[in-house]
Image (cartoon, rainbow, N blue to C red):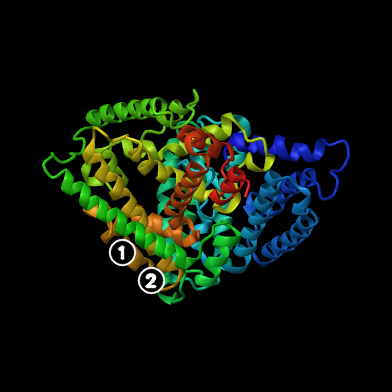
Amino acid sequence: MTRTATAILALGLSGHALAQPSPAPPGSYAALVALFAEWRQAQKPRVVAGVPDYGPEGIAALGQRLAAMRARLATIEASGLTPSQRIDRRLVEAEMNGLDFDLRVLRPWARNPAFYAMAIESQSDTPSREGPTIEGAIELWRLALPLPAAEVASLRLRLRAIPILLTQARANLSEDARDLWLVGIRKHREQAEVLAAFAEVLRPHHAELVPEVERAREAEDAFHAWLAAGLEAKRGRSGVGRENYDWYLQNVQLLPYTWQDELRLMERELARSLAHLALEEHKNRALPPLEPAATAAEWQQRADAALAFYIGFLREKQVMTMRDYMEPALRKRLSGFVPPEKRDFFSEVDAREPLLLRCHGSHWFDLARMEQEPHKSPIRRVPLLYNIWASRAEGLATGMEELAMSAGLYAERPRSRELVYVMLAQRAARAIAALRMHSNEWTIEEAVRFASEHTPRGFLRPDGDTVWGEQQLYLEQPGYGTCYVTGKAMIEALLAERARKLGAGFSLGGFMDEMNAAGMIPVSLIRDEMTGN
């Protein structure tokens, strides 16, 4: 959660609950807002000296608090709320269902060693971190060095918590989930590397904290060795199974799909994207291929030109209302030049046509909008837990790649259209792999191989961090691997519905503005709000 979002939560929720002259009327929307503020605290584990408690007693306490929160939510009947307020109630209920699923099925504290990764190196482009994130994680990218005096003690406490937490993890990780254990080994090797690099960054500013970082790194090295030694004994599958997957989609992600529905959709999108790629290649066969930028200077020139062209296109074609904060939000998130030997899927695409990732960069518009134009609903001002925002956030970012193409973005760049289908094929292939892992048909090695082999042009390296990191996330977070395509499909269906309903009164800009105004909520609920159904 960003600092701004945290402040909004404190002022818009906690303050609301504390500053009222009298208790909120039972069953009212004010009571729902007050409950939400309390729920956001109740769903966190107990933290002692910076160490979250994920042991048996701590987990039991979470279950008890969940039961109490659900009982209170049941007293707030949907019939007494406005349609928009009913959507907010469903969001609160979905978050509670998310914790219920964690307690019953996912149990990351007992099954997933990667859950105990405390150091987060970079900012996510989504409203909050993708996948399960441990309480108290250190977001290194937030630290502006040198730190203010007040933050030094806090960082020291959290660094000291890492060795204690990893000791706790050895006792907590009691369940057999081989693939999660395997990717946990990779994750904690990365954690040691991240901490080693952080020590060097920290040294010129806070040398007194470097020993704390080094002790944390040593604890990571020891934990990595412990995990590696235990892998041979692991035999259990890591997927949640179809029945649990269906429940999660419908009760947490609020999607109108089942595992089987998603598989059919992904297979269809993979076939469609590969077929259209072949057609585009046939049409463009007399044109020279897109060559990647050869130098950092050439890439920077292309990237700057692509950004200016894209922003101009959005304005000229009235795709959405453009605010002053939007171009800077996207500009400061430009990726850098990646040399050929280090390229892997997205950098392969970006080296050839930077417009593709500028389209996907609608994520940064979303984050800036949440900060600059907070939603009127206190419940929608902060990122939803359990990635409940995924169909909207990832669905629109992915959808913009093809929507912008259909609206004319690549009219003068025919070879770039090919890369739109390359991108879509990769999203569909990796989603099929994720689904087969959760049904426990495939191991993560098989999923990685399938995703790599079915991504065109050899752009997705089977030994690369991209495919392994993606499949790890999708195994940890049911529904995430498919949300890019399911969300895109739902947005396209909603666009079609509104165009049919409004006829000559439909405009793309109006549709996009109306959708954005609903907030970072599931597309199914955006449809409810926009259509009144």
Would you say residue 221 is visible in this rendering? no
| Picture residue at 49% right of the left edge, 43% below the top | 126
Instruction: State the SS at label 2.
Output: loop
Q: Residue 276 at x, y = what percent?
A: 26, 51
> Which mark sits nearer the N-terminus, 1 or 2?
2
Residue 442, numbered circle? 2
Give the farthest residue toward the left.
Answer: 286
Give the farthest residue toward the right.
Answer: 22
Q: CA distance from mark 1 to mark 2?
A: 10 Å
Vertical comparison of 450 with 200: above or below: below
| Picture residue at 54% right of the left edge, 59% below the top | 256
Residue 450, numbered circle? 1
On screen, residue 202 versus residue 13, left or right, reads left
Q: Residue 280 at x, y = what percent?
A: 22, 47
Instruction: State the SS at label 1.
Output: helix
On screen, residue 203 versus residue 79, left or right, reads left
On screen, residue 527 versus residue 226, left or right, reads right
Q: Residue 124 at x, y = what percent?
A: 47, 43
Circles 1, 2 touching at the beta carbon (< 8 Å)? yes
Callout 2, which amino acid?
A: Trp
Q: Where does the N terminus fall, quadrant-wise?
A: top right
| Picture residue at 80% right of the left edge, 56% below the top | 75
Would you say residue 131 is visible in this rendering? yes
Callout 1, which amino acid?
A: Phe
On screen, residue 35 versus residue 299, left or right, reads right
Give residue 237's quadrant in the image: bottom left
**Tag count in the figure?**
2
